[in-house]
Every structure is written in C-alpha cells, then in structure tokens.
Image (spheres, coloured by chain):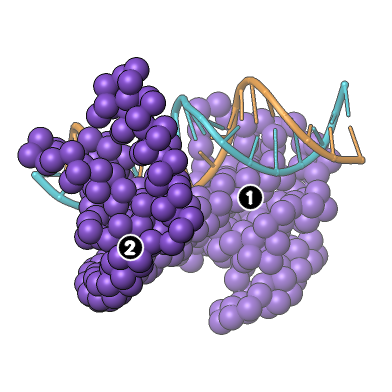
Chain colours: A purple, B orange, C cyan
Amino acid sequence: MNMGGSRVLGGVTVLLQNQKGLSSASQPLDPLFLSGSSKNSSSSSSSSSSFLGSRSMMSFQNVHGGNGSNTSLFQSFDHDENGDDEFDEYFHQPGKKRRLSVDQVQFLEKSFELENKLEPERKIQLAKDLGLQPRQVAIWFQNRRARWKTKQLEKDYEALLANYNSLKADYESLFKENDKMKVEILALKDKLLLREKEGVNLELSETNKLLEQTQKMPSEEELALKDEVSKVSAMVCKQEDISSAKSDILDADSPSRYTDGAHSSVLMEPADSSYVFEPDQSDLSQDEEDNLNKSLFPSYIFPKLEYEDYSDPPASSCNFGFPAVEDNAFWSWSY
DNA sequence: TTGTGTTTTATTGCCTCC
DNA sequence: GGAGGCAATAAAACACAA
C-alpha cells in the first residue's frame, strides 16, 4: 500500500474509531480501497450490489492503464480533486447508476450520525476516503436527510396519534361521568322541587288565614277607598258596558291591593302570560272572575322574579315559577 | 424467469442565503 | 449571481413471490 492509501485509510480508521459502539472498526474500509479484493465481492449477499465503488475504481484504473495493484486508488482521488476529466466523465455516464457498497454506506451512515449536514471540507474528505465524487457524497447526504425526515414524520405522527387516542379516551370517560352527574342533578332537583312545593303550600295556608282575618276587619282607609272606587265605577258604567269597565278598573289597580287569598293556589299556575290572562273561565261567575284576577297578583308570587334573570329557558317549558331555574340550570350543564 | 413493488442514486427546478 | 438545500421525480438496482 502506498503512502497515499495509508494516509487515507489511517484517517478513516481514526474517524470510525470515534464512532459510538463501533465494534469492528479496526480496518473498516480496507476492503473498500483494495480493488479486486475477494472480500469486497463477498461482503454483500448480492454480487451485483457489492462494492460497486470498488468496481468503479477498478474501471477507473483500467481507464488509466492501471497495473492492477491497489495503490492507485487514492492517487486517483488526487486527480479527481484536481478536476480529472476522465474520472468525472466516468462517474457521469448517462443512464448508469452505481450503488454504493455496503461498507461505503456504513461509513456514510456513521458520518451522518455524527452530523447530518455536510460542510465542503468534510464532503471532500469523505469523498476522498470513500473513493466517490464529492457530488455523490452530497447527494447521498441529501437523500439520507430526506429519509431521516420521512422517518421523523412517521414517528411524530405515531406520537401524535397515541396522544390523540389517550385524550380521546379521557374525553369519553369524562363525558360519561358528566352524563351520570347530570342525571344525579336532575334527580336531586326533583327532590328539592317537591320539598319546596310542600313548604310553600304550608306557608300559603298560614298566610291565607291571616288575610282572611284582615279582610274581616277592613280599616277606615280601605273602606273609603272602596267607596271611591265604587263611585268611579258607577260613572264609567254609564258610558260603557258594566262588565268591561269593571275589568279595566281592576286591571289598572295595583296588584298589591288584591291580596285576597281565596285563590292562593294560583301560585302553581303557569307563569306564562297567555295562560294567566286568558284562562278558560267560561264556567265562572263574574265574582269568581274578579277574585281570580285579584289572585293573580299576590305578593308572594314575586319570588319567581329572581329566576327570570336566567336567559331563555326552553319556550315549551310549562314552568310553574320554579322549573325555570331547573331549565336554566340544565342549560348551564349542557355543552 | 418474470412481473411487481421497494429502495437507492441521481436530476431538476425552485428557494434562500451570503 | 453562485452555492447549497430541499421537494418532487425519474430511473436503475434490488428483493421477492409466483
């Protein structure tokens, strides 16, 4: 082996010995640069694919009238470095592709592991070491980066997919738990509603007793006011139908004035205005009608107002004052 | 042996950076 | 404007089943 070969091989050996976990790096590229070596052709399962680089070198030596020794290889790279036209011509035969040898690829792989970018100096050195053109080395690195990127994308995709599946499982689990909790909430609200109904009824019956007692003993002011109303009603009735006039006057009065508890159960009537003002009263007498109208405005119905701040309960909900809360609470739990 | 799919090497065109 | 990188692609080389 000549000085040039020793120099290059020495460099290759040092380079490979720097690789991590390289077990057989003693003379990794010796076969690469020994043209005609039987080791070269047997290093791969496919004879055609093994050590084409070396084969190229042999051809190159033949082109240059080499003497068959393995010494001109690295000298030829010096020629290439100086722009040897024939060498360049050989490596640019149109329509021909020469696969790199297993050893060459291994060497390039190790180099790629160290650094996947290729500086010009390193490229030239690698080309020298492997008996390739710098452009071939550049192309190999370029293609290798493309392959690496593809694999990286696959890894990223798998990681994302695993992450997505995990999140999906979590979501479904939480969704089921949420459904369960909704059902529990509805059940609890039903119970609460029932209790509130019972409580209000009790309270109302006590209030009604008090009201009845109050009505039995009207104050002087109330009596005077009633007289005033009667006079006005009489005057209006001269002009209009008595019943309609009476209704108008009643509507104009403050609800607080009518605290008759005769129909206190109206609390549980629908709060919907259409229902309130258009009841089916065909079978009611005028007095009963009056009493009903009065009973529509008891002060204790106002607690329902605090629920009316909730937004847009379902239009179809036939709420009795309290269910509006339930509906809105339901919406707040909905997605 | 052959057809077919895959891998590897190489080219082309475009883009960015200096 | 030249060098170098990248994506897309061509085409040779390879692997493998039938």
| Residue A189 found in image quarter | bottom left
Residue A188 visible in rendering: no
Is label 1 on the same chain as label 2? yes
Where is the N terminus of chain A found, in terms of image quarters?
bottom right
Query: Dot 2: few (<14), some (14–19), or many (≥20) neighbours within 10 Å?
Result: few
Residue A20 visible in rendering: yes
Q: Which residue is mark 1?
A: A141
Q: Residue at x 72, y 71 (%)?
A: A15
Q: Position of residue A42 (x, y in %)?
A: 42, 63
Q: Tell me: residue A17, above or below residue A43.
A: below
Q: Looking at the picture, tell me which residue is in the foreground, A152 or A10.
A: A152
| Residue A85 found in image quarter | top right
Q: Position of residue A207 (x, y in %)?
A: 32, 71
Q: Position of residue A306 (x, y in %)?
A: 46, 58
Amino acid type of disc 1? Answer: Phe
Tag 1's secondary structure? Answer: helix
Chain bearing mark 1: A
Residues marked 1 and 2 touching at CB (< 8 Å): no
Q: Looking at the picture, tell me which residue is in the foreground, A210 or A227.
A: A227
Residue A108 appears left or right of A177: right
Residue A273 appears left or right of A80: left
Q: Looking at the picture, tell me which residue is in the foreground, A305 or A204.
A: A204
Q: Which residue is mark 2?
A: A215
